[in-house]
Amino acid sequence: MNRLTKMASASGVAVGLILGSGITAANAEEAPRSAEAAFSELVDALKVDAKTDAALTERFEDLPSAEQERIADAIEENPLSVMEFHAGGPTLTSETGTSPQSALARTAATGLHIQAAASNPRYTATYPVNASLFGITTGTFNMRYVFEATSTNVTRNLECTGWFTGAAGVWNISTSQSNYVSGGQGACTVTYRMSLAFKGSFFSANKQQQLVYKGTRLTSATLRNI
């Protein structure tokens, strides 16, 4: 059932209640539809695809009325406050697409000079963060960190980047990156500055992702508000 059909059904229920209670039509219709209207405006602003739109709407309509009202109030105050951000586990692969341990084992098996081969192999770490509503993903913040390392020390940073994929809608998202290598430890930091124009007002939220490796060992993976 699409959103318009559901809204029409809800209106029909409201009319039935009016006839039995004597409540005016204007007051009876305003209460159940105000929360849904606020949520619908947010979903429309995010410009998600039709399938995601339907899933979000259905999930919202399944909530108790009190929870719908709470979410609607939060949207009116700051629409970004209802978004959820979930970080996936970082992954690390070697230049050949295998794990660091497998790459070193294969090097040893071929009889090559291990010290020379292991001094600067390239590794790529990825760290996705999903932006979602009710656990339904609307977009992903992607982070990629490419570096050279031995098993115990990062020797050189090659890339530190971040970008957004998915339905951004009227979001304006800018990124900045920084990285360092110190004492065998390498770090990549990506900052996302997000703003949303919603019903004539502007709202902002900033997030920062960071990966830190000591050689091929992950020492820190963080996502925080700034």
Image (cartoon, rainbow, N blue to C red):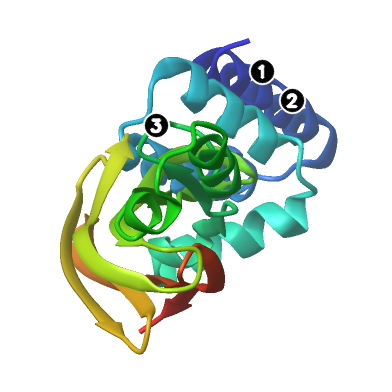
Q: Disc 3 on helix, strand or loop?
A: loop
Label 2 environment density (alpha carbons within 10 Å; few <14, some 14–19, many ≥20) = few
Above or below, comparing residue 101 to residue 184 in the picture: above
Which amino acid is tagged 2? Val
Of tags 3 and 2, which is closer to the observer? 3
Question: Which callout, 1 or 3, points at the residue further toward the start of the chain?
Answer: 1
Residue at which label 1 appears: 9
**Quarter in which the N terminus is drawn:** top right
Question: Which callout, 3 or 2, points at the residue further toward the start of the chain?
Answer: 2
Q: Position of residue 62 (x, y in %)?
A: 76, 36
Label 3 environment density (alpha carbons within 10 Å; few <14, some 14–19, many ≥20) = few
Q: Which residue is drawn at 40% across and 55% down?
A: 118
Tags 2 and 1 in contact by the CB under 8 Å rule?
A: yes
Q: Which image quadrant is residue 54 in?
A: top right
Cα gap from disc 1 to disc 3, whole angstroms: 57 Å
Residue at which label 2 appears: 13
Nearest the viewer among 197 and 122 is 122
Residue at which label 3 appears: 96
Q: How many marks?
A: 3
Tags 3 and 2 in contact by the CB under 8 Å rule?
A: no
Q: Which image quadrant is residue 196 in?
A: bottom left
Q: Disc 2 on helix, strand or loop?
A: helix
Which amino acid is tagged 1? Ser
Above or below, comparing residue 206 to residue 69 in the picture: below
Q: Residue at x 55, y 57 (%)?
A: 87
Of tags 2 and 1, which is closer to the observer? 1
